[in-house]
């Protein structure tokens, strides 16, 4: 407990965290008093118990893995009325950029080793890319139904208005309108949607513009579900989904979209991605990419996330996306850094997961449920208290492909929002009816 006590004693300067060790000894950190409003969680003091003799040492010895595993295994228990989200947000608000600095290996040797391991983990050949996609996205359909919006958008929602009074459903609809507006679409065009997920964006584009869309992804159940949706809507002739690596796609497309895809490509494969998509896009085409990103320099994915949630995943810095695309004939015509939107999205996902605890533990078990909570809360803090953002980049081969000013984006987004308005209620974890 000595090293953990030393760390928390330095870290907690606002709010209060009370730790009861396995032997019953209690440790208090922070002054208490007024709870910082910027934390985002519920007011403290927050009490946790370490139920195993191994817990404190495991957390400190393995800084990128220990806390998450201790919580998953039941070695770290957060006492009611608080939960793991409250604890994570309190600690990371105090130790700003905890995921980027305080929990990183201090020695150059260990840091270099972590970076090297992460680089190798980011090698996504066709076989490993499919295996990684299935690990993340081929979980039961029922799991994603429990915490995503009705359209199953598993990427950042766009909160144009007050996020505390905007539903996840409306924010996801606004995200699709914002992205579609940047594509500068016209009826009859052919669109390629790389990493199509559960088909929501492809179906949205077809509905709003009467375009033909080919969606590709590597998770079998995503593709099966997407094709079922297209059949139910009677648009299977216009919107097709294929279980295919984007590197195997052939043909020519007027527009290309990739939403939440570049995080899974791996930096070593960026040249291949930009070269191949450049080959697929028509000379006057437009490609739009939406992905999680670092607001600072390149880094590496933490070990816990690589092991348990997104094997092969990496969140890129803007410099990596721009410099690689330039080498293959792309011109970047629009860049938007979207701060904090994902923190609100993840908060909603977390609340809906908690509400469906019984169903999720029945599908899997308590360890999986706690793993999922830690993932969602940890990701939220990266966008709320850390340095993570979302990048939206627009690429063209010919700069005449889009209008000279950005007014067309705002005008078209407004038109799409008016056509696709959704109820404005915001999810309340205490009201089960709201999510059904």
Image (spheres, grey):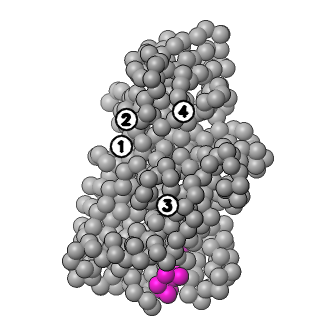
Marks 4 and 2: which is nearer the front?
4
Closer to the chain start, of discs 4 and 1, is: 4
In the image, residue 32 lies in the stretch drawn in magenta: no
Distance in Å between CA atoms under marks 3 and 4: 23 Å
**Please, what secondary structure does the residue beneath circle 2 have?**
loop
Distance in Å between CA atoms under marks 1 and 3: 22 Å
In the image, residue 209 lies in the stretch drawn in magenta: yes
Distance in Å between CA atoms under marks 4 and 1: 22 Å
Residues at badges 2 and 1 in contact (C-beta under 8 Å)?
Answer: yes
Closer to the chain start, of discs 1 and 3, is: 3
Identify the mark at residue 97; answer none if there is no mark: 2
Vertical order, 332 against 412 (above or below): above
Vertical order, 209 against 307 (above or below): below
Q: Nearer the viewer, residue 184 or 128?
A: 184
Answer whether residue 398 is visible to the viewer in this image: no
- The image quadrant where one finds the C terminus is bottom right
**Please, what secondary structure does the residue beneath circle 4 have?**
loop
Q: Is residue 82 left or right of residue 399?
A: right
Closer to the chain start, of discs 3 and 2, is: 2
**Please, what secondary structure does the residue beneath circle 1 have?**
loop
Residue at screen point 34% across, 75% down: 411
Closer to the chain start, of discs 4 and 2, is: 4
Identify the mark at residue 170; answer none if there is no mark: none
Residue at screen point 58% across, 50% down: 349
Which residue is identified by label 3?
171
Which residue is identified by label 1?
387
Marks 1 and 3: which is nearer the front?
3
Distance in Å between CA atoms under marks 2 and 1: 7 Å
Q: Nearer the viewer, residue 131 or 26?
A: 26
| Total marks in image | 4
Which residue is identified by label 4?
42
- The magenta span reads 206-216
């Amino acid at each position: 407990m000595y090293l953990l006590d030393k760390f928390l004693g330095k870290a907690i300067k606002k709010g209060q965290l009370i730790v009861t060790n396995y032997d019953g000894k209690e440790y208090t950190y922070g002054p208490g008093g007024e709870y910082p409003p910027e934390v985002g969680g519920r007011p403290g003091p927050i009490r946790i118990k370490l139920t195993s003799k191994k817990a404190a040492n495991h957390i400190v010895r393995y800084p990128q893995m220990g806390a998450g595993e201790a919580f998953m295994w039941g070695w770290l228990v957060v006492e009611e009325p608080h939960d793991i989200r409250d604890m994570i947000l309190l600690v990371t608000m105090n130790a700003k950029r905890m995921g980027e600095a305080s929990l990183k290996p201090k020695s150059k040797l260990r840091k270099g080793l972590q970076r090297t391991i992460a680089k190798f983990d980011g090698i996504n050949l066709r076989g490993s890319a499919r295996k990684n996609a299935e690990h993340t996205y081929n979980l039961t359909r029922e799991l994603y139904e429990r915490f995503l919006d009705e359209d199953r958008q598993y990427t950042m929602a766009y909160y144009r208005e007050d996020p505390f009074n905007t539903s996840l459903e409306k924010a996801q609809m606004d995200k699709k309108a914002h992205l579609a507006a940047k594509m500068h679409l016209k009826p009859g065009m052919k669109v390629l949607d790389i990493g199509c997920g559960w088909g929501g964006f492809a179906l949205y584009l077809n509905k709003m513009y009467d375009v033909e869309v080919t969606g590709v992804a590597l998770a079998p159940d995503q593709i099966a579900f997407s094709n079922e949706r297209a059949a139910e809507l009677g648009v299977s002739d216009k919107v097709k989904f294929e279980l295919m690596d984007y590197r195997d796609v052939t043909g020519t497309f007027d527009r290309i979209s990739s939403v939440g895809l570049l995080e899974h490509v791996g930096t070593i494969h960026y040249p291949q991605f930009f070269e191949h998509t450049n080959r697929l896009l028509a000379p006057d085409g437009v490609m739009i990419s939406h992905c999680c990103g670092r607001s600072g320099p390149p880094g590496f994915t933490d070990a816990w996330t690589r092991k348990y949630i997104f094997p092969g995943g990496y969140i890129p810095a803007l410099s990596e996306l721009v410099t690689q695309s330039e080498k293959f004939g792309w011109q970047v015509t629009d860049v938007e850094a979207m701060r904090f939107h994902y923190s609100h999205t993840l908060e909603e996902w977390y609340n809906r997961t908690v509400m469906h605890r019984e169903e999720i533990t029945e599908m899997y078990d308590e360890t999986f449920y706690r793993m999922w909570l830690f993932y969602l809360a940890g990701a939220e803090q990266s966008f709320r208290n850390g340095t993570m953002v979302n990048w939206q980049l627009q690429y063209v081969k010919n700069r005449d492909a889009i209008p000279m000013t950005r007014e067309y984006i705002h005008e078209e987004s407004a038109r799409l929002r008016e056509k696709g308005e959704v109820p404005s209620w915001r999810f309340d974890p205490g009201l089960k009816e709201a999510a059904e």
